[in-house]
Amino acid sequence: MSVKAKYQGVLDLGEQLGIKDGNVTEEGGVLKIKGQANTPYEKDLIWDKIKALGGENASDIKANITVADDSVYHRHTVASGESLSKIAKHYYGDAMKYKQIFSANTNILSNPDVIHPDQVLVIPNP
């Protein structure tokens, strides 16, 4: 299996996320990928995928992923049935951190128990 084939899932994820200025080369059995993620969360997703496919200390891939906007962790579009605690659990692994998300969005939210589909919420940096 070629190194590019091994990491095809990373390349597919990058395409799904709309990674900008993407560049992929293979030299001497090492896959080199470069690009710009929109947010730190998207960068973390790419790195998590690299680790899932290549292990914690993969020597057959080198990635240089920069971030366009590091003032926030991510921007989340609310889906039907979501709550701030569910969103907090997804991004932070802790539902009680919903207060951080509420505080970062008081310009559009007046009650942490009331959010609506299609609202775009700022997910603050952890």
Image (cartoon, rainbow, N blue to C red):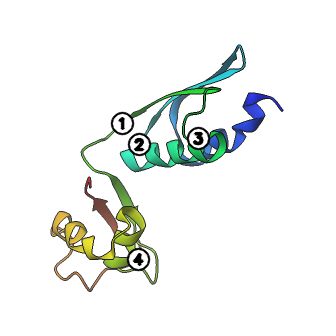
In terms of secondary structure, where does tag 3 sit? helix
Q: Of discs 3 and 1, which sits in the foreground?
A: 3
In terms of secondary structure, where does tag 1 sit? loop
The numbered mark, 3 or 4, whose residue comes first in the sequence reads 3
Could you tell me residue 47's position as x and y percent? 51, 42
- The reply to whether discs 2 and 4 touch (Cβ–Cβ < 8 Å) is no
What's the CA distance linking mark 1 and mark 4?
Answer: 26 Å
Residue at the spot x=53%, y=47% of the render? 48
What's the CA distance linking mark 1 and mark 2?
Answer: 5 Å
Label at residue 80: none
Seen from the viewer's position, the closer of residues 17 and 125 is 125
Q: Which residue is mark 3?
A: 50
Local packing at callout 4 (Cα closer than 10 Å; few below 14, some 14-19, many 20+) is few
Residue at the spot x=26%, y=52% of the render? 125
Q: Which residue is mark 1?
A: 68
The numbered mark, 2 or 4, whose residue comes first in the sequence reads 2
Please, what is the three-letter code of the amino acid marked with disc 1? Answer: Ala
Residue at the spot x=22%, y=81% of the render? 112
Local packing at callout 3 (Cα closer than 10 Å; few below 14, some 14-19, many 20+) is many
Q: Quadrant of residue 117 in the image?
A: bottom left
What's the CA distance linking mark 3 and mark 1?
Answer: 20 Å
What's the CA distance linking mark 2 and mark 4?
Answer: 22 Å
- Along the horizontal axis of the image, is 11 left or right of 113? right
Q: Vertical placement of 64 versus 83: above or below?
A: above
- The reply to whether discs 3 and 4 touch (Cβ–Cβ < 8 Å) is no
Seen from the viewer's position, the closer of residues 40 and 114 is 40
- The reply to whether discs 1 and 2 touch (Cβ–Cβ < 8 Å) is yes
Please, what is the three-letter code of the amino acid marked with disc 3? Answer: Ile
Q: Vertical placement of 12 versus 105: above or below?
A: above
Q: Which residue is mark 2?
A: 38
